[in-house]
Amino acid sequence: MATTPRRTPAHQLMVNCLYHSHIQHGQPPLPQILRTLKRLPELYTDFAGAADGTGLSSTANIQKIIMGSHHSLPSAVQLSRLILAFQHLAWADGVLRSNPGLSTLPGWQALLSEARTLDKEQERQGIFLRDARPYPEEPVRLPVPGPGSEPSRALTRAEPVEMTSIELHGLTTLGPYARSLAVRAATGDPGVLFEVALALFASGDPYDQRAESFAANAAAAGVSPATDLLMACKVGCAARAQLTVQQARVLEHAAAYSGDEDAALFFSGCVDRAVIPGARKTAPLLED
């Protein structure tokens, strides 16, 4: 008897990133996406895969890929064509101020490659979600990080944490590095969980409501800046916001020094978005 293929956290988080990208680009209707896909050869003459309609020849197939109904992740060409269609329609409808065109594709392709690598590794390790094909709005439970040092365990302990639709939405608006964080969180890496917590704290309500849970798991695994962040949370919102800005600036400078432009821009954005009590709150803007 054939068994139902099981899904890893990495696979599902990649699906969810694409699903939320569709929403963040104005959720264009499937017929409009299909018409735009057919126009890609004239819209993007420099894109080699513009005319490759494999798997995207009907609205039903498009919906299956966006919703993650297939057993496998989308192909590189399918992902690129969908992103180009989303962007074009978002620009035409005024959701985006400008159309970034092909410039966003390397980031999306790197994300897909990373997701595939993590997917295979989690399959090998037997790390699967309970549902074979979860709905993209459902939370994704992440692996619990390993224990850290004795001092960190005395302050907090790791608990199972889920990445909800709201948190994923908040991350995927913040550019390619944040989308990579969302997918890499599938491993339960404590350093990644700390950066996720930092981004959620910086984004304000409603994205920061469970950010402390991500920081707690990172702290329990020995990430000392996450412990500092938790202690600031106990002092109050002002202390937490101030430390969020300080930590984001440190990471921004480290990323700039190492030449990681995407990460530097991400942490710079966290500084800009950090909500200081009494300041005007602004929602994250879509950054492709």
Image (cartoon, grey):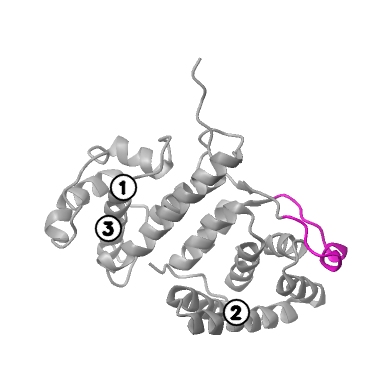
Amino acid on which disc 2 is placed: Ala
Q: Quadrant of residue 90?
A: bottom left
| Distance Cα–Cα, label 2 vs label 3 | 31 Å
Asked whether the viewer can see residue 142, the reply is yes
Residue count near mark 3 (Cα–Cα under 10 Å), binned few <14, some 14–19, many ≥20: many
| Distance Cα–Cα, label 3 vs label 1 | 15 Å
Q: Which badge, 2 or 3, is on the more N-terminal residue?
A: 3
Residue 133 sits above or below residue 191 on the image:
above
Q: How many marks?
A: 3
Q: Which badge, 1 or 2, is on the more N-terminal residue?
A: 1
Q: Nearer the viewer, mark 1 or mark 2?
A: 2
Main SS class of the magenta portion in the image = loop
Residue 271 sits above or below residue 126 on the image:
below
Residue 160 sits above or below residue 211 on the image:
above
> Which residue is at a point 53% across and 38% down the rendered structure image?
7
Front one among 206 and 127 = 127
Q: Tell me if label 3 and label 1 are in contact, CB under 8 Å.
A: no
Amino acid on which disc 3 is placed: Leu
User: Mark 1 — residue?
Assistant: 29
Q: Answer with left or right where residue 147 lies relative to residue 67.
A: right
How far across and down, in percent of the image, does residue 146 sit?
73, 55
Q: Name the mark on residue 248.
A: 2
How far across and down, in percent of the image, does residue 105 sit?
32, 62
Q: Secondary structure at mark 3?
A: helix
The magenta stretch is 146-160
Q: Is residue 21 in the magenta section?
A: no
How far across and down, in percent of the image, does residue 229 sit?
73, 74
Q: Name the mark on residue 94.
A: none
Q: Secondary structure at mark 2?
A: helix
User: Mark 3 — residue?
Assistant: 84
